[in-house]
Image (cartoon, rainbow, N blue to C red):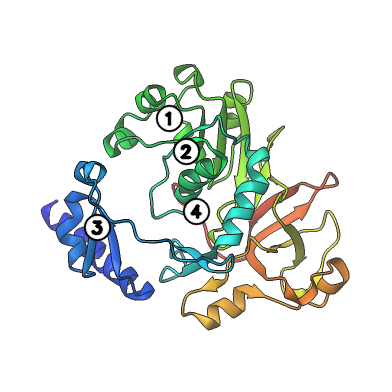
């Protein structure tokens, strides 16, 4: 076990160092426990602990002007088909998506949101920032509670809104967490058993979205059914021929799901070839369906889907060989 831990720790160090190098980081905000490790990657480490909250001498510099098209954050893919890629998401993309989809998520100023997702995942950004934009509260459990005492943390913090993978939600029972009024399930397919367990106890919501498109791209906010991922509330989704992105398919026909508009990320950092293959512009059909025409960025998700007659989208797997294991 000691040898295995050493290997894992070395991989962690190499990964963190690679991230700092990729984004040319100059500052790390760190916990006290990670101060020494963080200082090996950048020169400036800001340690967040109890002293920083009580130190009245801390100088807060004047805010730097920010444009809507500036990068708000960089999220990393899981690396399921190779080295993780760095996705650039702009301020306008995040703000538009948070505000546009909040009603469908049942999120507002009264929400007490569980910050459950691990920080490497973009869902954590949604959990942290969207409630603050709306005037809600972010409930952050201790790491030990998140891993081993999740039920107690939910009850103790008075959580009424949370987003989990179905696998994690299956570890909980509705009657044990009565404060929860909204449960968002995403990240993996929802099973009929998940729906039957939660649908009569909470407001059950299904969320879908690749990290390339600002966390959440589609939402199903009522009458959840397996495979149906809802509709887009911030931008537009199209289904195109999986082998030819210049050709749309008709309603009911399976093709590749394409997401377009402001929620689509800027692309992958320093990866022009991969950006060009996944983020497209000027497909032949675009000027016919939107006045934005060639100014709209589109992301090819690689997911197979079809439109239902009511405007919702049914997800039907992948067009490649990717599979999801353990969420």
Q: Quadrant of residue 108?
A: top right
Identify which residue is drawn at 50% across, 42% down. Answer: 132
How far across and down, in percent of the image, does residue 35 sit?
18, 56
Q: Quadrant of residue 50?
A: top left
How far across and down, in percent of the image, does residue 56 sit?
24, 46
Inter-mark Cα distance, 1 to 2 = 7 Å
Instruction: Report the residue marked by disc 1.
Output: 171
Instruction: Report the residue marked by disc 3.
Output: 46
Q: Secondary structure at mark 4?
A: loop
Which of the marked residues, 4 or 3, is nearer the chain's N terminus? Answer: 3
Inter-mark Cα distance, 3 to 2 = 35 Å
**309 sits to left or right of 221:** right
Numbered circle sitting on residue 324: 4
Which marked residue is nearer to the observer: mark 4 or mark 3?
A: 3
In the image, residue 123 sits, relative to residue 202, either above or below, namely: below
Which of the marked residues, 3 or 1, is nearer the chain's N terminus? Answer: 3
């Amino acid at each position: 076990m000691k040898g295995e831990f050493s290997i894992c720790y070395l991989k962690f160090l190499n990964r963190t160092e690679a991230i700092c190098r990729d984004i040319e980081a100059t500052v790390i905000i760190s916990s006290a426990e990670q101060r020494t490790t963080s200082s090996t990657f950048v020169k400036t480490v800001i340690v967040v602990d109890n002293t920083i909250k009580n130190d009245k001498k801390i100088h807060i510099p004047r805010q730097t002007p920010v444009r809507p098209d500036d990068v708000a954050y960089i999220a990393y893919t899981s690396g399921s088909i190779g080295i993780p890629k760095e996705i650039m998401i702009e301020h306008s993309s995040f703000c538009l998506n948070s505000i546009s989809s909040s009603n469908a998520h049942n999120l507002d100023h009264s929400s007490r949101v569980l910050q459950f997702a691990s920080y490497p995942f973009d869902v954590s950004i949604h959990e942290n920032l969207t409630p603050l934009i709306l005037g809600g509260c972010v409930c952050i459990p201790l790491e030990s509670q998140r891993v081993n005492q999740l039920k107690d943390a939910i009850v103790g913090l008075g959580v009424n809104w949370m987003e989990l993978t179905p696998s994690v939600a299956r570890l909980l029972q509705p009657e044990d967490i009565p404060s929860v009024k909204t449960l968002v399930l995403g990240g993996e397919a929802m099973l009929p058993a998940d729906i039957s367990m939660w649908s009569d106890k909470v407001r059950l919501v299904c969320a879908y979205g690749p990290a390339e498109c600002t966390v959440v791209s589609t939402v199903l906010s009522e009458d959840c059914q397996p495979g149906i991922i809802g509709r887009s509330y911030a931008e537009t989704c199209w289904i195109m021929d999986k082998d030819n992105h210049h050709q749309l398919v008709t309603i009911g026909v399976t093709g590749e799901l394409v997401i377009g508009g402001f929620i689509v990320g800027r692309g992958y950092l320093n990866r022009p070839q991969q950006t060009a293959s996944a983020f497209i512009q000027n497909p032949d059909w675009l000027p016919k369906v939107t006045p934005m025409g060639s100014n709209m960025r589109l992301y090819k998700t690689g997911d197979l889907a079809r439109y239902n007659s009511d405007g919702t989208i049914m997800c039907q797997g992948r067009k490649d060989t990717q599979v999801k294991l353990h969420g």
